[in-house]
Image (cartoon, rainbow, N blue to C red):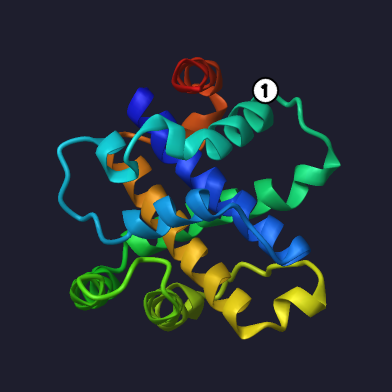
Amino acid sequence: MEDQAIALAAVFQAAFLVDRLAKTGSIPEESYRVLLESLTKTQSDSTMEIYGDRFSLQLGLKELIGILDKRNDQSKVEVVRYALTLLYLEGKLHKRQDMLTVMSQRIEQIQQQTLHFEATHSNIVGAFASLYKDTISTFPQRIQVTGEPKHLRVDENADKIRALLLAGIRAAVLWRQVGGRRWKLLFTRKPIIKAAEALL
């Protein structure tokens, strides 16, 4: 359950940061960095290792607890929509071995680039954004990001949003790998909240 809480927290952190970036044009650097770095961590001994430590997912854990505990107001509607759509799209991706193969090959190429650039460097972010655009964006149901046009029109922000959505998909894949399923959210809400609170 702890592993599921970690993976879900990463999904919600990605959703939260997409919403914040679209509406304000800025996001906390460290919370952003850890999600992008997770995209190149394809070999790890634990779920937590992918995200470094529990402190790197504080934002996501808070969002996850608040939303599952139904404490949040209407301002979280978009965050919930993004998170649930990421889980839905991962379900579609799970059935597309051809697309998974392409993504794996592209991630390997990006891993080589990270030997020379940080995960948040514009070259790497652009590569992640391009990968998202060429794969997940081709599904009929796409994530429609809403926010301030002045922020969404900035190319750098558009790339960051796509990279974050890719990181959200990666977290959703991880959630499936540790036993998570969308229908289970209805029945395991309290255990997930408890695990998330312990991590927080």
Q: Quadrant of residue 45?
A: top left
Alpha-carbon neighbours of circle 1 within 10 Å: few (<14), some, or many (≥20)? Answer: few
**Which residue is located at x 60 percent, y 31 percent?**
62
Q: For this rendering, which residue is in front, 97 or 121?
A: 121
Number of on-image labels: 1
Q: For this rendering, which residue is in front, 160 or 12?
A: 160
Q: Is residue 109 left or right of residue 127?
A: left
Residue 103 at x, y percent in the picture: 28, 72
Q: Is residue 60 left or right of residue 80?
A: left
- If the image is split into quadrants, where does the N terminus sit? top left
Tag 1 secondary structure: loop
Residue 28 at x, y percent in the picture: 59, 52
**Residue at the farthest right position:** 74
Q: Is residue 141 visible?
A: yes
> Which amino acid is tagged 1?
Asp
**Which residue is located at x 53 percent, y 77 percent?**
159
Q: Quadrant of residue 68?
A: top right
Q: For this rendering, which residue is in front, 9 or 80?
A: 9
